[in-house]
Image: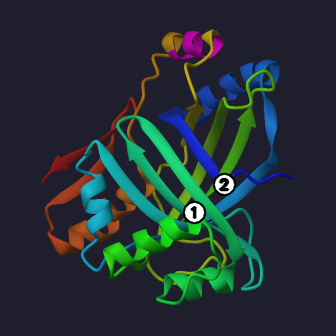
Amino acid sequence: MNIQTIFERYEMKFILTKQLKEELMELLEEYMSPDPFGEATIRNLYFDTDTYRLIRRSIEKPVYREKLRLRSYSQVSSDDSVFVELKKKYRSVVYKRRLILPEREAMDWLNGGICPVQGQIASEIDYFYHYYDTLHPVMYISYDRQAFYSESNPDFRISFDDNILSRQDDLSLTIEPNGTRLLDSDHVIMEVKTMGGIPLWLAHFLTEKKLYKTPFSKYGTAYREQILPYKTGTWKSEYNKNPVYEEKRR
């Protein structure tokens, strides 16, 4: 199977009840196919500076933002392959570049070691790592994903993320998923990924069900709920009945 290492696309997020997800699944059976990875528990290890510079900037919603993470699609050992991903967003377009490395080599590199491979993507990630100087693992986030793609347009994809968990200890992809839930059990995150517009059948469904794009950053949510309150004591997050994610001052 060819592994894609460079992405450029629009990404839109929606928060759905599980009932609405099941209704949408009936449409997906007609228009889309399961992703080759099928259903997977995705594990992510996010890197940031000592002052959380990357996520603090990201939640300010600038026109340009960026992040570095390790990702795996299954439980791994130190010899198994993981993805080293540099993800950037400029205005509404997401750019992602990634490498595949053994977990041990990836962690050695991102803990201050020497870049183990050569190439354009490796150089970009290495430059990013050294530019921010104090990057280190700060947050583990896992979730169960179902992914689908359009056979008529493989660039159009839909995924559902459920059971979103985060933790600040045991920061390794080799340890089983566990942590604090970031979204209540009756809702899932739907991501729509496309190089262009969305098909009419999906547009009609979103309009009929009054579903709107909702900014939801998993790392950003974890930072607000698990780190920021202890640093400042001034923020909390809630989900209203729509549900739309909001920030509110106490």
**Would residue 135 be seen by someone viewing this image from the given angle?**
yes
The stretch drawn in magenta includes residue 61: no
Q: Amino acid at mark 1?
A: Ile
Amino acid bearing label 2: Thr
Q: Residues within 10 Å of mark 2 (few under 14, many from 20)?
A: some
Q: Give the magenta-colored segment's residue range.
A: 201-206
Residue tagged 2 = 5
Q: Which mark is residue 121?
A: 1
Label 2 element class: loop
Disc 1 packing (10 Å; few <14; some 14–19; many ≥20) = some
Q: Residue at x 24, y 67 (%)?
A: 228
Label 1 SS:
helix
Q: Position of residue 10 (x, y in %)?
A: 50, 33
Picture layout, residue 38 above or below residue 10: below
Left or right, 90 with reference to 155: left
Q: Position of residue 144 (x, y in %)?
A: 66, 54
User: 115 or 194, which is in the foreground?
Assistant: 115
Vertical position of residue 188 compared to residue 103: above or below: above
Q: Is residue 130 above or below residue 41?
A: below
> Could you tell me residue 2's position as x and y percent?
82, 51
